[in-house]
Image (spheres, rainbow, N blue to C red):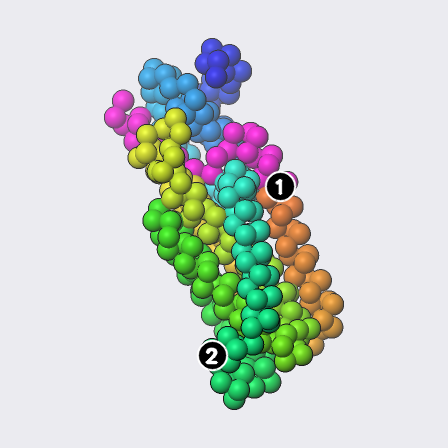
């Protein structure tokens, strides 16, 4: 990167942040502008430190961000702007930057489910070794459908949300080890393939997919995103690129934190669909349509907001501001 050209392109934004930081009393619009410029300059610092590290420029931008952060601390708009910025920039940008990891994980798992179901359907003896005829009858005729209506919808939504958030969190938390992520994903799709093959063999394929797809599309996508991000965390220290292993692992770890927080909201949506839409009296096509709509909205979110934020230089580094303050203190 041409550092001089980068400085010329963004110097006016840094000067404006200096002016806002030095203003004794800010109006409402000025406070919003301060937060906007703070986020932009934080991105500039991240770019400079990664692509063209210059000790003097890093110290200047870090000190400027530290003063701006202290200036904005306590303002009512900061918290809400931070939350809004997280869901409109940091989270979707992180998803977009890591898209090939989780899309590849998505595709590999879907293919694995299809192959496993095809193989299980061709080997009925395996099915019989897993469950007795009575257990199969119980699953097909009672357990599978009653699972979605056993509890009150609100309680079930919370239960599903916590369970899936826990699985996704494990994929990310254990990501640096690599193998546990593969194991968690395999367990997830193996259960789906086994139940799907049993329901299909018993003539209930339509029933199975009619109950799985409304919530399962978004729910499994979130789990696959977590798995893909976890595997990227593992790869960050195996192949760190131009960074040291510790720097690469730290950067991807912070990005993983962004994704983990964002997936809580995604899984909350899938939990609500699973509790209120999946067991509802709506026609099967309508329930599946709602699931497809939720999936389309998610991908539009990633490739719309995420792509735009990524091209503005947002990386999804959740802890960048804290690091900038630390550098400023040391300087």
Q: Residues within 10 Å of mark 1 (few under 14, many from 20)?
A: some
Res. 206 mark: none
Q: Is 176 in the magenta?
A: no
Q: Which residue is mark 1?
A: 303
Is 82 situated left or right of 53 in this image?
right
Q: Which residue is mark 2?
A: 129
* Residue 283 higher or lower than 240, as above or below: below
Q: Name the quadrant of the C terminus.
A: top left
Q: Earlier in the sequence, mark 1 or mark 2?
A: 2
Q: Residue at x 25, y 26 (%)?
A: 330
For marks 1 and 2, give the one nearer the viewer: 2
Q: Is residue 227 visible?
A: yes
3D distance between C-alphas at marks 1 and 2? 45 Å
Q: Residue at x 56, y 76 (%)?
A: 124
**Chief secondary structure of the magenta span?**
helix
Q: Quadrant of residue 123?
A: bottom right
Check disc 2 and report its element: helix, strand or loop. Answer: helix
Q: Between 227 and 307, which is closer to the camera in this rendering?
A: 227
* Residue 39 higher or lower than 260, as above or below: above
Check disc 1 and report its element: helix, strand or loop. Answer: helix
Q: Residue at x 65, y 69 (%)?
A: 209
Q: Residues within 10 Å of mark 2 (few under 14, many from 20)?
A: few
Q: Is 322 in the magenta?
A: yes
Q: Quadrant of residue 329?
A: top left
- Residue 144 in the image: x percent, y percent? 56, 78
Extreme residue toward the left, this view: 330
Extreme residue toward the bottom, this view: 134
Q: Which residues are magenta?
A: 303-331
């Amino acid at each position: 990167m041409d550092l001089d050209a980068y400085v010329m392109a963004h110097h006016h934004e840094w000067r404006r942040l200096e002016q806002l930081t030095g203003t004794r009393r800010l109006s409402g619009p000025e406070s919003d502008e301060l937060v906007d410029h703070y986020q932009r300059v934080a991105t500039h610092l991240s770019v400079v430190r990664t692509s063209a590290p210059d000790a003097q420029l890093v110290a200047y931008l870090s000190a400027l961000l530290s003063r701006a952060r202290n200036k904005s601390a306590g303002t009512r708009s900061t918290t809400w702007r931070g939350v809004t910025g997280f869901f409109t920039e940091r989270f979707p940008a992180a998803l977009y930057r890591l898209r090939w990891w989780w899309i590849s994980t998505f595709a590999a798992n879907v293919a694995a489910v299809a192959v496993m179901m095809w193989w299980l359907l061709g080997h009925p003896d395996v099915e019989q070794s897993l469950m007795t005829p009575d257990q199969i009858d119980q699953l097909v005729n009672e357990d599978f459908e009653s699972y979605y209506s056993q509890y009150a919808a609100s309680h079930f939504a919370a239960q599903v949300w916590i369970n899936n958030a826990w699985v996704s969190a494990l994929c990310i938390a254990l990501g640096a080890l690599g193998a546990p992520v593969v194991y968690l994903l395999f367990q997830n799709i193996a259960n789906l393939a086994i139940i799907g093959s049993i329901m299909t063999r018993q003539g209930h394929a339509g029933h199975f997919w009619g109950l799985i797809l409304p919530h399962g599309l978004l729910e499994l996508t979130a789990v696959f995103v977590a798995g893909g991000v976890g595997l990227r965390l593992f790869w960050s220290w195996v192949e760190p690129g131009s960074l040291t292993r510790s720097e690469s692992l730290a950067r991807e770890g912070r990005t993983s934190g962004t994704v983990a927080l964002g997936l809580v909201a995604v899984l909350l949506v899938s939990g609500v669909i699973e509790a209120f839409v999946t067991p509802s009296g709506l026609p099967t096509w309508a329930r599946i349509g709602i699931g497809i709509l939720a999936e389309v909205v998610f991908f539009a979110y990633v490739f719309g907001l995420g792509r735009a934020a990524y091209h503005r230089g947002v990386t999804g580094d959740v802890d960048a501001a804290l690091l900038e303050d630390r550098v400023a203190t040391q300087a």
